[in-house]
Image (tube, helix red, strand yellow):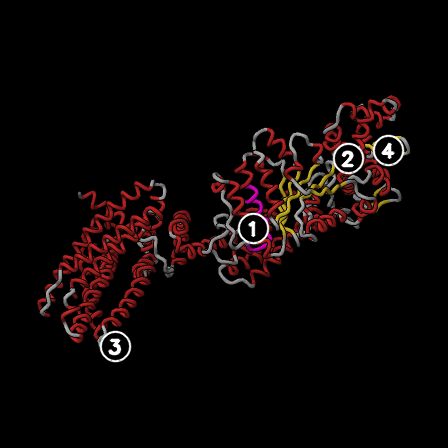
Amino acid sequence: MLNFFREGLHYIHFAFFKTLTLKAETERLPKTEVIIIFLKTYAVVCILAMLLLAISAGASDVTGYVAGYTFDWYSAYKLLFLYQAFGLIFGLIFGLVGGLIFGLVGGLIFGLVGGLIFGLVGGLLGWPILVDVDYLTKALIGVIFTSLAYGWGFGHAFGLNYGLTLGLIILLALVPDRAEEYMALVLFLGFVSGIISGVAEGMVGGLLLMLFLGLLFGLNEGVIGIIYNIQVLIFTYFFFHFRSFYILPHVFQYWRSSRVRNPFSYFRHSPVYWDQMIRMPLPFLQDWLLDLVRCDPKQGLDQLFFVVNERPFQRKAAFRALLIIIGKYLENTQSVADLTQIAKMLVDFPADDKALPSSLQDARKYINVVSALAADYQIRQTRTGQLKVLAELHDRLTDFQKLMKLTVAPVGSTFEPLTIKWLHMVSNEQEKLRQQSTHNELPNPYIAGNPLEVRDQQLFVGRSDILLAIEQFILNTDQRPSLLLYGRRRTGKSSTLLNLPRSRFEPVYIDCQDAKWHESDQAFCYNLAHDLFNVLYQSDSVRGLRQPQIEQFDKNAFTQLDQFLTQAQKIAEQRDKRILLAFDEYEELENSIINGDISEKVLGKLRNLIQHSKSIVVLVSGSHRFEELTRLNWANYLINTRTLELSYLDAESARELLTKPVPELHYEAGVVDEIIHITHCQPYLLQAVASELVNYLNSKQQTTATPDDLNTALEKTLVSASAYFSDTWRKDNSEAEQQVMRALATGKTESVLADAAFQPAIQSLIRKEIVEGTEGSYRLAVELFARWIVRNQV
């Protein structure tokens, strides 16, 4: 029996003071077990209510004896049982629908508080009084006894918390090291003293207030009761909802902890630990957490993250304290190399949390960029490349510093001094590099192999026709076509996707060669939502859109994706943009479906987006047209597809690529024309030859390229670009096609061109743009490729 009663008190305590813990513990329980726990607890609630009513009624009998009035026990218990029954039904319903926490709280409010107070009121007033006594007598008795009843109810509630708080203060003040030994005794004394003082204050205050209101409103007990009810309920709600009675013990413990060497025991014996439902911001909590970290960084951070994770209504103070701590830590950065780690300092801050300072999101974006640029600086091998990254880093830090200057504390006051320090560090690094250089090296912006990012736009030339077509097919029409960006390998498909007009698109670049897109349907849906969130987050605010969590996609992954995309589309429409899902190397999805890693539901989802999503555009990019892929019917899924074809650059664009990005680079007559001729304006090879040429000129400390310099660069390119040449030779080429390529490279074409059996191979190579017809004959389109074949395949 004692264990039964103890268990009931345990759940009552958790319902009021550790609501979140109770919710977390019981969410995993089956509904039947939840109801059993509720019924056990509710039995204890009923016993408590009856005991308290008996004690209250006994006190009322004494008062009634003096006033010549007898307490109506029948009416009191009738109301008590009525409210207990209502509370039981309410608790059961919400226990089934909303979980144990809602059932307990609802049942406790109606069964314990409601039944107790209204049972006491019914016993004090009684039913006969409302019929047999004249108006004036009824009003007087109503005023007196209603005030006493509500005074007792409110005084009991206030006294209970007041007594417990007083007991805890006495206990911690007198014997903090032996708190457990004296806990029961001191709390009991505090409880008793609190009840006595609370009831007395409640009765006297209620009586005086009710008499005053009675005179003011002509002793109309209906009006008086309503007004008093409203006052008591409003005051009681806010008093206990925000737990304002914790201010005194909290401040007292903070004051005590500031006067000792080890403040942690006082923090653990403060209201922060007693009650996880304190909604009122506790004063000095931020300063207290900072003091704890200064005293002992490890223990202090443990306490800080305890507040972050376990006390949701105090997270704002904890986050502000954590931000200040991080700012102090970042003051130790001494070099550009240290900046590579600063982004990691903010990983403890969630992406979307109302407790965070709103301006932290802007600071985080800049910090991520600064950290990435610092890491890029570390891997650059040439002084020119390093100076270029440092210049960009300096620009971003300048923008960051200007923003933080206008940002309020604690974000602005934390990061503005840091940006000034970091700017000074970058300037010193730039000056040191300039002093080390005795020769002005040519910058080498050429990127052979990797896609061109947005910041490499000076290298992205000759694709205005593709960008114009995208604008015509997507932006300037109400239709929703899907697009196929077709081009052979290394023709710049990925670079085109990465340089789409972001002013009108929210482009999500999806590299289908990445293994994460082939793990499962659930992983595919999660990664798509995750990458889209990152794009929206980097470009602007994403209020109303939560960062997807992988656990959400374990079940009903496509439904979860639909819900996310619906919210994302609303954000895109507010920005007057469209979301572009760009699937690069889309053929890899076919291989994954054939292998059973993902299902055709993925393609069905893309078809659904094309048909029904006004703000989402699907673009696939690859080196095969749909008709060349025979294992899946892509045209059935990617309906209404417009094909955009990427080929070689035109001569004018190739010349621009060779001359404009590096104005300091000069060419002797004929060198540029030779590069254009030998590469046939193939984008990858243009970049590869130009890169080797710049590196070679820098090694010779000269800025003008001669024909001999070009020949050396071409020899180097045959080695550095061998992977591209090998892939072109082997990928999707039959043995007959390889024989044709070998014959054209060596000039021994008689046996091949005269044999009709080789004609299908020749036509296939023409479609692939590897071979081109010239005046009734054929030749390899790229002369540099022919040189590689002669060197490696003959």
- The residue pinned by badge 1 equals 568
Q: Residue at x 63, y 33 (%)?
A: 590
User: Label 4 sits on what residue type?
Assistant: Gly
- The residue pinned by badge 4 equals 773
Quadrant where the N terminus is found in the figure: top left
Looking at the image, tell me whether mark 2 or mark 4 is earlier in sequence order. 2
Question: Tag 2's secondary structure?
Answer: helix
- The residue pinned by badge 3 equals 217
User: Label 2 sits on what residue type?
Assistant: Thr
Q: Residue at x 26, y 54 (%)?
A: 86
Disc 2 versus disc 4: nearer the observer:
4
Q: Between 386 and 792, which is closer to the camera in this rendering?
A: 792
User: Label 3 sits on what residue type?
Assistant: Phe
Figure check: 111 above or below 5: below
Give coordinates of residue 302: x percent, y percent. Answer: 40, 48
Give coordinates of residue 158: x percent, y percent. Answer: 24, 62
- The residue pinned by badge 2 equals 717
Q: CA distance from mark 2 to mark 4?
A: 26 Å
Looking at the image, tell me whether mark 3 or mark 4 is earlier in sequence order. 3
426 left or right, relative to 97 = right
